[in-house]
Image (spheres, rainbow, N blue to C red):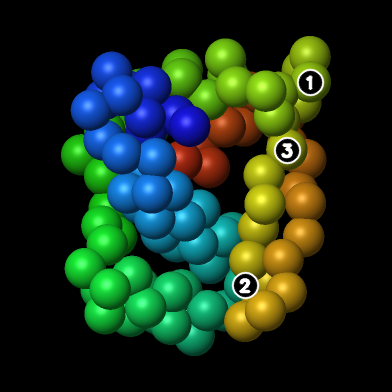
Amino acid sequence: HAIEKCSNYVVTHGNAVAAGMAVIAKASYANSYCNVTVYNRLIAVLSAFGLPAQTGYSAEDLAEAALLDKKRDGATFSLIIPNEIGRCSIKTIGTEEIFDFFKAGL
């Protein structure tokens, strides 16, 4: 949703989800929530289907947009994190951590 908002809804929902999955997977790998194989397989699947695997928006822009999202609950934000192929978990982080998380995924 952050990518859609940053693009003023020019980026389609599907493309925004694909790019967002890539950012989250890269940040998850950088934060040791998953291994590099998970990230690499996701990028390979996105590429195989011609979907974007990156975004041109800054971590600051994405964080600002994400903080307006429905996944925010006061001072926390819930992220769906890939742990391994076929298994994800919900990771709750403080809103002050969202910028660094996105930065790790870009």
At label 1, the amino acid type is Asp
Say what secondary structure mark 2 lies in: loop
Tell me the quarter of the picture where residue 77 sits: top right
**At which x and y percent is residue 27?**
50, 55
Q: Is residue 97 visible?
A: yes
Say what secondary structure mark 1 lies in: strand
Q: Is residue 103 visible?
A: no
Query: Which is nearer the N-term, disc 1 or disc 3?
Result: 1
Say what secondary structure mark 3 lies in: strand
Which disc, if any, is residue 73?
Answer: 1
Query: What residue is shown with label 2?
Result: 34
Tell me the quarter of the picture where residue 44 sits: bottom left
Q: Is residue 74 above or below residue 70?
A: above
For image coordinates 53% across by 67% down, the residue present is 29
Residue neighbourhood size for the residue with mark 3, other residues' Cα within 10 Å, grouped as few (<14), some (14–19), many (≥20): some
Q: Nearer the viewer, residue 4 or 22?
A: 4
For image coordinates 78% across by 40% down, the residue present is 92
Query: Which is nearer the N-term, disc 1 or disc 2?
Result: 2
**Residues at circles 1 and 3 in contact by the CB criterion of under 8 Å:** yes
**At which x and y percent is residue 99?**
49, 30
**At which x and y percent is residue 65?**
46, 20
**At which x and y percent is residue 85?**
62, 81
At label 3, the amino acid type is Ser
Give the CA distance from mark 1 to mark 3: 8 Å
For image coordinates 57% across by 60% down, the residue present is 28
64 left or right, relative to 31? left
Which disc, if any, is residue 78?
Answer: 3
Give the CA distance from mark 3 to mark 2: 17 Å
